[in-house]
Image: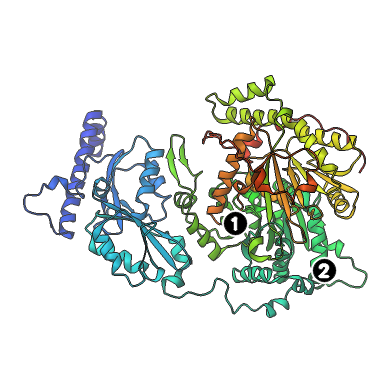
Amino acid sequence: MSLTITSKSSTLTEEQKKRMEENRLRALQLKQKSFSNSIIPNTKPAGANESNSSNQPGQITPTNGKCVYLNSDPTARFEILIGYNKELIEIFKTVSSRKYDPETKRWNFALTSYDDLLLKVKSRLSSVKIEPLDRVASSKSTIAKFHLIDRTRFEVQAEYNLELQELFKTMTTKRYDPQTKKWSFELKEYQDLVKKILNKFKRGEVQLVPLPNALLDVFQNQLKGLNYPKIDPSIDFEHIKKKIDADIAKSLMPFQIEGVKFAIQQNGRLLLADDMGLGKTVQALAIASYYKEEWPLFIIVPSSVKFMWKESAKRWLSESLAKVCNLKHGDLVDDFIQVMENGRQMIYPKSKIIISSYDLLAKNVDEISLNDFKVIIADECHLLKNNKAARTKAVFKLIQNSNRVILLSGTPALSRPAELFSQIQAINPNLFASFHDYGMRYCDGKESRFGMDYSGYSNMTELRLLLEEKILIRREKKDVIQELPSKMREMVILNPSLIELNTKTLKQASNKMDQNLKGMEKRGALLKYFQETSKVKAKAVTEYVSDLLESDKKFLVFAHHQSMLDELEAEIQKNKYDYIRIDGSTSSENRQVFVQRFQNSDRCQCALLSITAANSGITLTQANLVVFAELFWNPGILVQAEDRVYRIGQKNSVIIQYLCAKGTADDQIWPLVNEKLNVLSRAGLTRENLSEANTVNRPKTNLFDDLIEEDLKKNEKTVQSIEIDNDITLEEDDDLKSIDLAQFERPPIKKPKQ
């Protein structure tokens, strides 16, 4: 009989097979309908059209389905009726709220995942069509979005709905803001408010966009009506002092003590994001000292500051090293601190502090990770913004079994909130279920024709509150160092008569910008325009700097292109002034030598610095004037460069000057820099605002002597606003680095011995 069946089935036509499959699915639908009617009584008015029921599926196939409310939990979950589709199931498995019912063989999800799931399906499987829930099609539906606005309160953003407004008024902790027209409540009433909305309104009348699960987990005490301080008062610094080096304990300022206490409260896993110059290094070493019983300590830093970290470790951790290494008379601390200088170098068995660059770690992570380091410091951790980069993968491999992870960055979100995610994962991999969930909530995630786009920002206040509660501590100079003078910025318009705007190459580069370019071609055109701007403004810049040299005052000059640095260096040499130059070719050892020379020698008047190679890891507080010969498209880099002088130890007012040439790429880069810095400010990660800079047209002579005394307001001029293409995004990212920047630079001129 089995042979007969096999033979018969083999003669079925494709049309017959299709009809049999349709009959099978129709039988399943009828069975489900009968089951649904037995669970949910019919509450429809007499005569209502049964075909309009949200639980009546249409034609169900592997590529055609619909969403229906889950019978057992219709106010919180929905399920998808669709035939078996392997690719679709893989998408289902990416949703954190997913559940599979083996009896019905269906997947169901939380209503909070509804929009994201349908967006995923639409963007990844264009052949699959899923009918939405009835509530989405309803024009009467009110969307109520919940947001956290401080540690104890949340607000609801919704279109006007009289019944919803009346419900809000019944809440004990209600507060209405007539300006924003939003209601807010204490977190302890959150769950009660959600229940009241679900109970009062019929299905689909009000769509809730609730607070994310990550936030509810972190703010459990506030949900219970308990408002504890951010840092537990029971963490006693007197106890901490007994476990860290005495020299560090004595040197820590009050806000730095709070940073150490926060780190210990978080079990040594945090992102220390203090402003530049507030002593992140000493705080990180104090935290590492507290956990010295778990050493060896591994420190990951940019290559240019490896030796600076070694000197800091020698200064602050000698006592810890003596205890961990059982140092005897005559033993040298240096012998137990190892700086990795090349890939062939092995980690010595007796080394208790190992310092490596990101690049060296990326090349040798397999060998280095065999040591199973339990305490890790990563300086300038914003370098980990790209989770696909080799250095990020290497760091993650190293820290996966670490107990303590101390990330340091003065600018933790240099461009986009999306770039914070890898750093968050390094510290607390369980905080967010997935990058998609994070991106939809905080990166204004949306579908584009190229897939999902997470390059934006949204709910920035909530993100800052969430991070500050669990992993992030950030203080700014103006908040904690009262004696530190403020910065004053000026955008200086260079002498137009010295700007060569009519050069053929500049015009070609400018005209190229008007073309409809895409991708790397656009980036190349932007960089070419940027490079040509450097050339045409060089004469005006060198004259400006030459005038400053006559003042006999110390100052810093930052530039990006080698050609600009070379022009400035030639001018300084011609006038026989003493100076230092630090760029990408300067070794770590020479950097420190040059810094000490600038700081200690009255004759050394000018520090000529590369924006990208010398924006961090050095202190030049003997100067109080910083001049940017060129702009740069990343505001975090600019602020970091400014802070080479704006640090602890600075006793004078700090003046920052940006030299701009009208009619060049500066017209586009300047407003772009302002916009990006505003994004950081909304996230609470910086309060710097370059738009506060005065616009002045300075005389060429006697400039420096008049800098402070001159009434800036009398010389204030308004810069003509330039409309820029919002699609242009110049960033220091991996895509940009793939362009050979050397093609825009000529080799540096030979430097005299310093």
Relative side of 718 to 193, left or right:
right
**Observer-nearest residue: 262 or 514?**
514
* Residue labelled with disc 2: 318
Between 147 and 118, the residue placed more toward the observer is 147
Element marked by disc 2: helix
Q: Secondary structure at mark 1?
A: helix
Coloring applied to the structure: rainbow
From the viewer's perspective, tell me whether residue 745 is left or right of residue 579: left
Judged left or right of residue 641, residue 605 is right
Q: Earlier in the sequence, mark 2 or mark 1?
A: 2
In what quadrant of the picture does the C terminus appear? top right
Q: Is residue 533 placed above or below 601 in the rendered structure? A: above
Q: Is residue 747 rendered to the left or right of residue 500? A: right
Crowding at dot 1, Cα within 10 Å, few <14 / some 14-19 / many 20+, comes out as many
Q: Residues within 10 Å of mark 2 (few under 14, many from 20)?
A: many
Task: Name which residue type carries label 1.
Answer: Ala
Image x and y of residue 447, in percent: 42, 40
The residue located at (49%, 57%) in the rendering is 461
Q: Residue at x 67, y 39 (%)?
A: 631
Instruction: Name the residue carrying label 1.
Output: 426
Which quarter of the picture shows residue 579?
top right
The amino acid pointed to by label 2 is Ser
Q: Are marks 2 and 1 in contact (CB under 8 Å)?
A: no
Seen from the viewer's position, the closer of residues 67 and 116 is 116
Query: Can residue 189 be seen at all in this image of the molecule?
Result: yes
- Could you say which quadrant of the image residue 180 lies in? bottom left
Residue 410 image offset from top left, x and y in percent: 66, 55
